[in-house]
Image (cartoon, helix red, strand yellow):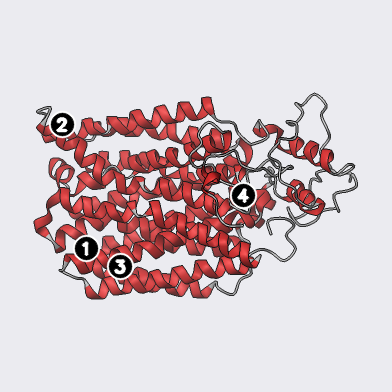
Amino acid sequence: MGFSPAVLWKAPEINPINRKARSVPVLNVVNVYGRVFFFAWFGFLIAFWSWYAFPPLLTITIKKDLHLSTKEVANSNIISLTATLLVRLVAGPSCDRYGPRNTFAGVLLIGSIPTALAGTIHNAMGLYFIRFFVGILGGSFVPCQVWSTGFFDKNVVGTSNALTGGWGNAGGGITYFLMPAIFDSLVHARGLTPHVAWRVTFIVPFICITVTAIFMLLLCPDTPTGRWSDRKIAAEQNLQAHVPGAVVDVPTGKLGEKYTSGTESPASSEKYDEKKPVAAAPAAHEVEIGQQEMINAAQAEVVVKPSFKEAMYVVFSLQTLTLAAGYFNSFGAELAINSILGTYYLKNFPKLGQTQSGRWAAMFGLLNVAYRPLGGMISDVLYKKTHSLWVKKAWIHFLGVVTGCFCIAIGLVDSRNTHTMFGLVAGMAAFLEAGNGANFSLVPHVHPYANGIVSGVTGATGNLGGIVFAIIFRYNGTHYARTIWIIGIIGIVMNLAVAWIPPVPRRQLGGR
């Protein structure tokens, strides 16, 4: 059966065990699944806007006002990614323990404080300090993806994750329009001096972040089954209602591998607490699935709180490292290039000026609206047609290699023709951003019981890539083209190096 536009607004069919939606009601914010989808992408968009609010004004206005050198600007770009790396590593386990909604809102509220304090900067050290703590907002990507994974079933999770990530990433493009526009209006319409105007400009994202976080807490649930602390019991009750005598087994040894059949009660099972709230009654939109798929969903696809040893097993598994390698190159390259693209355009095309070069650079981030979701959607279609995770994985590596080829072309040509330059960058962005979406289409299948850890490590490694590439930019000065072709070579080599690794561990239960 083909795609029906009605799925964009009608209440979705749901998995009877984990209550995850089997379609994405993009246009229905009244429905709980549509509402969570909206806050997932919009919350990340607002965070990304503020996270990258400095580069559009840093090229000329802030640099001139604070008397910064080119190296100090480059250092601030590196520092802004460092905090995000650390927060993403912490946000993953935090999602598994406290739930993605609470983690998401917490990151937004904490990150809003340094955003409001941006106006207190008076020198390079102050810029480093504020940009480091504003970088906390970049960690919102992890709860965004974990929350989306928790509400959408594996047949559409690639699409939902790609849409929330892609539309959220568009904040990196929107900021190149919004920040100069707000600044210009304060200077020309309100009569503020540039010294004051750029500082006042940061109050706008602060207000947006705070309001979004508050409404996220007030209007959205932790999980489709209710409170985060009750997710395991809800899954067990749903399973018992559909498969009498079945239980949700708590695994021993390596998480997700050593399970009973699910039809008998082992000694290690979680104790049933009758005082806990009962899961919701079966809904009219439940989809029919087989008994074994129900058992797998209940046993292996409900997030648990892993021990330190179990967490380390997930972190250092070849599958997690493969996802991390792909994201190191795709999202890492996006972050680093997004930080310098406006300056690169201004160098090659000085007649554009700060505002116009920023607007053209914004297109790089704005293409996420289309291409990151497309990468996830194609991944889901390939999976639906082949029922093979190898195909999802091959799609990731194909996109990574083609992206590398575009980067090499951009670096070697280093065009002074706007049509050639903008065309090559748009082509590179298409494959790079689709690669981001494809990567997080596979993430929910790998160690699904520890999705927060896998998402956190993968997301953090993307930031690590951004830091590494930003350092390469830093030491190549204004030779931006040379760094871009170096990024391309690294991307091709790393994708080919991990192409042989199976998409999921051989003994993994669930996620397939």
Report the Cα–Cα distance between label 4 and label 2. 44 Å
Q: For mark 3, does the 10 Å Cα neighbourhood hold few (<14), some (14 to 19), or many (20 or more) residues?
A: many
Circle 1 SS class:
loop
Report the Cα–Cα distance between label 4 and label 1. 39 Å
Q: Nearer the viewer, mark 4 or mark 1?
A: 4
Q: Position of residue 448 (x, y in %)?
A: 66, 52
Give amino acid for label 3: Ile
Q: State the quadrant of the N terminus.
A: bottom right
In the figure, residue 109 lies in which quadrant? Answer: top left
**Residue 123 visible in rendering:** no
Sequence order check: which comes first, mark 1 or mark 2?
A: 2
Circle 4 SS class:
helix
Q: What residue is drawn where x is 31% and y is 63%?
A: 426
**Would you name the residue on which mark 2 appears?**
186
Give amino acid for label 1: Gly
Q: Nearer the viewer, mark 2 or mark 3?
A: 2
Q: Position of residue 11 (x, y in %)?
A: 59, 38
Q: Nearer the viewer, mark 3 or mark 1?
A: 3
Circle 3 SS class:
helix
**Would you name the residue on which mark 4 appears?**
451
Q: For mark 2, does the 10 Å Cα neighbourhood hold few (<14), some (14 to 19), or many (20 or more) residues?
A: some
Looking at the picture, does residue 36 appear above or below residue 475? Answer: above
Q: Is residue 162 left or right of residue 76?
A: right
Give amino acid for label 2: Leu
Sequence order check: which comes first, mark 2 or mark 3?
A: 2
**Would you name the residue on which mark 1 appears?**
477
Q: Is residue 390 left or right of residue 331?
A: right
Q: What residue is drawn where x is 45% and y is 68%?
A: 399
Looking at the picture, does residue 500 appear above or below residue 461? Answer: below
**Would you name the residue on which mark 3 appears?**
484
